[in-house]
Image (spheres, rainbow, N blue to C red):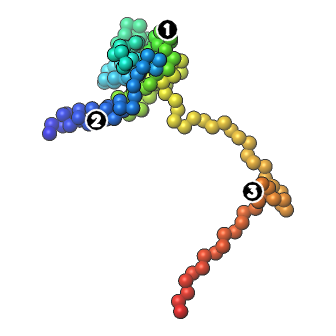
Amino acid sequence: MDHQKAKRKRQLRRRQHVRSRIVGTTERPRLTVFRSNKHIYAQLIDDLSGVTLAAASSTAKTIRPDLPYGGNIKGAQLVGKALAEAALAKGIKLAAFDRGHYKYHGRVKALAEAANAAGLKCCEPRNPPKAEEAPPAKAEKGEKGAKGGEKQAKPAKKKPTEE
């Protein structure tokens, strides 16, 4: 099979795998990303009615003057911020992030995080920072705390003896 055809087939399989779990609604549209070598595009789609609610790209006239090149992380951040502003203007605060067949890394991650920072909640950190807790108070010698205070030695394993 031709290398490009095989590559495209793998991309479509990955895209369908991601899309099987994500459905855009009017309240929470799907934020989809397309990444080319020179530019990046993002849009909010309502899958139930088949309508694009908002869109932004590095080729837009509003973004283009601030951006000499749209194929880098800085361009993705500007597009994410512009999309979030357009969404908030239409009253959209939540979105389901659809990364397509791309890894959540680099430009795709930068776009999602910039949109999130600008007020469009589309991705939440996988490992949110935990609130720091005070370490438990150490029990003094002779006192036993709630858990016994001291470590108990494990019984030694008996080795089988030959008879």
The residue that appears at 43% across and 26% down in the rendered structure is 97
Which sits earlier in the primary sequence, circle 3 or circle 2?
Answer: 2
Q: Which percent across, then down, holds residue 2?
A: 15, 37
Question: Which part of the image, by quadrant, shows the N terminus?
Answer: top left
Q: CA distance from mark 1 to mark 2?
A: 35 Å
Relative to residue 146, is residue 119 drawn left or right? left
Q: Among all residues in the image, which is located at the extreme left? A: 1
Q: Residues within 10 Å of mark 1 (few under 14, many from 20)?
A: few
Front in this rendered view, residue 5 or 155: 155
Amino acid type assigned to the residue bearing label 1 in the image: Ala
Instruction: Tell me where residue 144 appears, x and y as whole percent.
Output: 81, 59
Tell me if label 3 and label 2 are in contact, CB under 8 Å.
Answer: no
The secondary element bearing badge 1 is classed as: helix
156 left or right of 126 in image: right
Taking the spot 43% from the left edge, 16% from the top edge, the residue there is: 26
Above or below — where is 108 with respect to 129? above
Estimate how packed mark 3 is, as few (under 14), some (14 to 19) or many (20 or more) residues with alpha carbons within 10 Å: few
- Separation of residues labelled 3 and 2 (CA atoms): 52 Å
Q: Which residue is mark 3?
A: 147
Q: Residue furthest front?
A: 48
Residue under label 2, please give it. 13
Three-letter amino acid code at the position of disc 2: Arg
Residue 89, labelled with which disc?
A: 1
Label 3: which secondary element: loop
Percent x, y for residue 25?
42, 20
Q: Earlier in the sequence, mark 1 or mark 3?
A: 1
Q: Quadrant for residue 66, please give it.
A: top left
Identified at 75% across, 48% down, the residue is 136
User: Are the residues tagged 1 and 2 within 8 Å (C-beta)?
Assistant: no
